[in-house]
Amino acid sequence: MKYFDIVVVGAGPAGLAAANAAAAGGGSIAVVDDNPVAGGQIWRGGPQQQSDIRAGAMWAALQAAPNVSFLPHTRVLYAPAPGQLQVQTAAAAGSAGSATTLHFNHLIIATGARERLLPFPGWTLPGVTGAGGLQALVKGGYPVAGKRVMVAGTGPLLLAVAATLRERGAHVVAIVEQAPLPALARFAGSLAATPAKAAQALRLFAQLRGIAYVRHSHVVSARSNAAGALDAVRVRRGKSGTEQVLDCDYLACGYGLLPNLELAQALGCATTVHHGQTVVQTGSWQQTDVPGVYCAGEGTGIGGVDLALVEGRIAGLAASGQTQRMQAALDERARWKKFAARLARAFALRPELATLAADDTIVCRCEDVPHGELRAHTSWRSAKLQTRCGMGPCQGRICGGATEVLYGWRPDAVRMPIAPARIATLIATSDV
C-alpha cells in the first residue's frame, strides 16, 4: 500500500506534462505506466530519445524532482474504493510480481488512445497490420528493408508512418488516403494558423517525395498467396470507383485513433460524444464529474501531441492547486482545440468504409465472430451475450471500435479488471 497526493496514470506526453506541472506545487506524485519506459506511443522508446526537445526536457526535470516517483511496468486493474487504485507490477526474473494498492488525493488519467481498425475481406491476413502498430514494430527493430509496404487509411499519421518505413529501407508502394481532395485542400490551407504543423507537413512530404499519395481512395480487400500471407491489395479510387490491384508484402492500415476510456469509465466518469467519438467529459480545468479525478490528452478527444501537452499541464496545475498559473495554458488549449476540430472535419470517415465487410469477414478476432452473425443484433450487449463478441483477451478494444463504425454500437460497461491480470494477483486481491 502506497500513498501519494497525486497519481498520474499514463507516461505519454499528457501524463508527463501533468506530472511536470504538478511537481512545482509540492506534494508526492506518482506516474504509473505499464510500459518499461516513459513516453507512451508518441514518444515511444523513451522521452530522452526523441527529436522533440520538449520530451527530453520534461523527463530530465521529472527525474530531478525529489517528489516525483515513476512506477514503470505497473498496470492499473481496478478501483477498489474512492481514492484507491489496485495495480499489478511486472514479474521480473525470479519474481512473481505483486499486487499493490495506490492511495491518492487526486488522480490524473492520461491513458492516451489506440488505433481504430476496420474490417474488410482479408484484414486478418498475416502482413496486414495497424499503421501505428507497424511503425512501433519498426522503431523497435523489426526489419522491413526491401519489403513492399502499402500505407492506407486516413490522417497525418499515414505520412509519419510512411516516412519511418522509408527511412528503414522499405519500399512504400503508395499512401492511400480516404479523404477527398477538397477536404485535404481546406485542411492544408488551415495549417497557416499553426505554422509548426505546416512546417512538419512540408518536412514529411519532402521525405516522401516520389511516393504516390492517392486521395479519395480506400482499400477494398486484401489477397493472400499460396502460403496464406498477404500478396496484394485491391484499392477503389476516386469518384469513378475504378479499382486497382497493387502488390505488396505489408499493408499498414490507420483509420484514426480511439480514446482509451476504460479506467475513466470504471471510475464512473461521465462521457460524451465529440466529433463522433465517445470521450471523457471534462470541465475548464480538465476535471471530470468524479471529485478529485482529472483527464488529459486523447481521452478527452483526439487532438495530437500539442493539445495533449497543454491539457496535461492544466490538469497538473489544477490537481496541485496552482490555478493562478493557468491562464496561458488555457489560451493555448483553445488554439489547439481548433486545430483538432479541423483535423476531425478533414479526415472524417466516409460511409463506404462501413460496407466493406462480407458475411464471413471476421469482426471480433479474439472470438472469431463474423460480420454475418453480428449484424443480426441491435446492441453491443446483445452481441456479447449471443456471440461472445468483445469477450476475448482484448476485451473489445479492437472489435469495439469496429462495431461502432459498422453498427453504431458503443459499449455500455467496462469489465473488471480493466486489463489482463495474473491469477496470483487476483488471488491476492480478494475483492475483485
Image (spheres, rainbow, N blue to C red):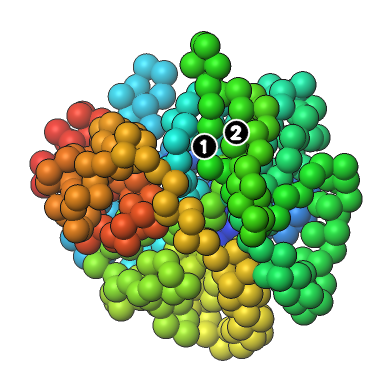
Element at badge 1? strand
Q: Residue at x 41, y 77 (%)?
A: 282
Query: Pointer 2: what residue?
Result: 233
| Residue at point 34%, 45% (across, down) | 399
> In the image, residue 428 lies at what x, y percent?
17, 36
Q: On screen, 121 above or below 61? A: above
Q: Are marks 2 and 1 in contact (CB under 8 Å)?
A: yes
Sequence order check, earlier mark of 2 and 1: 1
Residue neighbourhood size for the residue with mark 2, other residues' Cα within 10 Å, grouped as few (<14), some (14–19), many (≥20): many
Disc 1 packing (10 Å; few <14; some 14–19; many ≥20):
some
Q: Which residue is labeled 1 in the image?
A: 221
Q: Position of residue 232 (x, y in %)?
A: 61, 28
**Quadrant of residue 6 within the rendered picture:** bottom left
Up-down relation of residue 68 to residue 364 (above or below) = below
Decide which of 243, 317 is in the foreground and name it.
243
Question: x%, y% of residue 331?
Answer: 64, 86
